Amino acid sequence: IWQGQSGEELYYTTAGGGFSRFAADRWQAFALADEPLLGDQVRSMAQAENGMIWLASNGGVQQIDPSALSTIGQNGARTDVSAVQRFAQINSNLFSNDIRVLLPDSKGGVWFGADGAGYYDGATWSSYSTVDGLAGGIIQAMTIDKAQRVWFGAEQGLSIFNGDAFFSLTEAEGLPNNQITALLTDRSSPGNIVWIGTGGGGLLRFDKNQIQVYNRSNANLPSNTITALAQDADGSLLVGTDSGVARFSNERATSIRPIGATQITAIAVGENGSAWIGTADNGIYHFNGLAWEQFTSQDNLPTQHVTSILVDQDGGVWIGCANGGLVHYLDE
């Protein structure tokens, strides 16, 4: 992976090896066959406090050190590609290769979600399942609240881990829908509020053990199936659904019209009011603070199906694509 020095550039590598850079409306291929991604579907990305970027895919987990990425010359020569560390069942105690979501914590460890949950503290691996009290099904979302409790959104309910034990909620305890698809800790509020997206029950606000439900009927959401959540600088939520995205503020949602009724897969917020919104079939939309622009396969995005987005500490944007590997967009 290479960060260029001449403006806006796109980079990607695929599971089959190889590397490409987009600059000045052209692609250039470089040989990098010995450093492929573990899987071609990068489902989740996050940056730890130490700057390391973690990728979760259908082939395991990778850690990237952005500061150590080698420069690859136009003739294909490279000096060092040791910035990538891989974790899979074959070389570690990772509990599954099919990782759906990951989340670094403030202690330097990383949580992983799949069919069950796992934790890596930098030396030791741990795993958790329904036997430990975790909700059943695939873990699809995670967040850490202000009390440092870890929340897990699964196909069959919501689980909260306080460091010692799990507490789980399902429809039997009052959830409108068991399928938890998105989780977000509210960083703008003085309390410890967590927002919960469901697969048909709308958007939930969890505060002081009370749940407030927002849906199409009472809040004008585009759909009751929530697929992604993010929070912008003014505290408003960006709520992705299977039928478009909306800005949610003061208990009301306003649809973002330029994007339309498409399935949203990922949302990330950058500096100066910028936002990146990934879709299942229309590529990615970028709001630069003034206007929206769209990137698709016609703009050399590897595929139309975006699976994950990360805005890193330097403002670089990492885009996971279904069957298309990883793209790095740098706007200097």
Image (tube, rainbow, N blue to C red):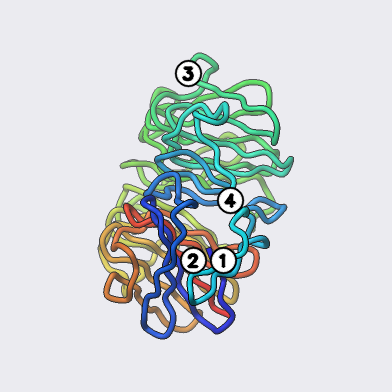
User: As rendered, which of 53 and 242 lies closer to the eye?
Assistant: 53
Which residue does the image show at 44% across and 80% down from the upper left?
A: 23
Give the residue pinned by disc 1: 78
Instruction: Label 2: state its secondary structure.
Output: strand
Mark 3 touching mark 2, by CB under 8 A?
Answer: no
Using the image, determine if residue 180 lies above or below residue 281.
Answer: above
Closer to the eye: label 4 or 2: 4
Quadrant in the picture for residue 26: bottom left
Say what amino acid the circle numbered 1 marks: Arg
Say what amino acid the circle numbered 2 marks: His
Q: Which mark is residue 141?
A: none
Sort mark 4 into few (<14), some (14-19) or many (20+) by Cα contacts within 10 Å. Answer: some
Q: Which mark is residue 84?
A: 4
**Residue 75: image x %, image y %?**
48, 75
Say what amino acid the circle numbered 3 marks: Thr
Sort mark 3 into few (<14), some (14-19) or many (20+) by Cα contacts within 10 Å. Answer: few
Which residue does the image show at 54% across and 22% down from the upper left?
A: 128
Q: Which mark is residue 130?
A: 3
* Figure label count: 4
CA gap, disc 4 and disc 2: 15 Å
Earlier along the polypeptide chain: callout 4 or callout 3? 4
Give the residue pinned by disc 2: 328
Closer to the eye: label 3 or 1: 1
Mark 4 touching mark 3, by CB under 8 A?
Answer: no
CA gap, disc 3 and disc 1: 46 Å
Mark 3 touching mark 1, by CB under 8 A?
Answer: no
Earlier along the polypeptide chain: callout 3 or callout 1? 1
Which residue does the image show at 44% across and 54% down from the upper left?
A: 33
Mark 2 touching mark 1, by CB under 8 A?
Answer: no
